[in-house]
Image (spheres, helix red, strand yellow):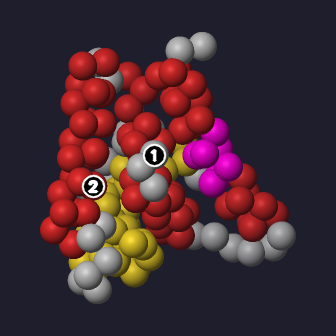
Amino acid sequence: MTLTSFRRFMAKAAILLQMAVVVLFVSCGGEVSPQELAAVSAKGYYEHLISGEYEAYLSGVNMADSLPEGYREQLLTNARQFMARQKEEHGGITGVSVVGASTDSVAGHTNVFLLLSFADSLREEVVVPMLEVRPSEWRMK
C-alpha cells in the first residue's frame, strides 16, 4: 500500500466514523434533519483542514475520488497554502463551529454556515454548499 492510498483509506475511514456517530445518534431516538447531517459533515471536513489532514479534507469534495492525480495534487497544495496563509496573517485557524444550515431546493444543495475562529481573535463566517451524494452522506460542492 502506497502512502497516497493509505491516506485516502484513512480519509474514508474518518468519514465513515463521522457517519457512524450520526447513525448512532439517530438509532438512539434522536431525529436528525438533512441540514444537521450536512452541517456535521461540513464541520468535520473543515476540522480535517485545520488539523492539517488535507487528504481527509479533500475526500469531502464531491467526486474527489475521480479527480485526475495532477489536479488532486493541485487541490492539496492549495489547501496547504491556504492554511499557511491563515497562519501567517492570523496565527492560524483555532476552531470551527456551525452557525446554521439551509436547503436551497431550486439549486439542489444545502448551504452550511460555519464560523471560523482565528488565533488573533478574528472570526469569519463562511458558506459551504453541500450535496447529499447518497442517503445521509454529504460532500462539499
Q: Is residue 132 visible?
A: no
Does residue 18 show up magenta in the picture? yes
| Nearer to me, 81 or 140 | 81
Look at the numbered discs 2 and 1 and tell me whether their residues touch, using CB distance below 8 Å.
no
Q: Which residues are magenta?
A: 13-19
- From the viewer's perspective, tell me whether residue 39 is left or right of residue 135: left
Residue that appears at 38% across and 32% down: 64
Number of on-image labels: 2
Spot occupied by residue 48 in the image (x, y as percentages of width and height): 46, 53
Residue 22 image-quadrant placement: bottom right
Q: Is residue 49 visible?
A: yes
Residue that appears at 24% across and 54% down: 84
- Give the Cα separation between the discs numbered 2 and 1: 11 Å
Residue that appears at 63% across and 54% down: 18
Spot occupied by residue 27 in the image (x, y as percentages of width and height): 81, 63
Residue 91 image-quadrant placement: bottom left
Element at label 1: loop
| Nearer to me, 49 or 44 | 49
Task: Please name the residue that numbered disc 1 is placed on.
Answer: 53
What is the three-letter code of the residue carrying label 2?
Answer: Met
Task: Please name the residue that numbered disc 2 is placed on.
Answer: 83
Does residue 94 show up magenta in the picture? no
Mark 1 Cα within 10 Å, few/some/many (few <14, many 20+)? some
Quadrant of the rendering where the N terminus is positioned: top right
| Nearer to me, 128 or 2 | 2
Residue that appears at 74% across and 66% down: 26
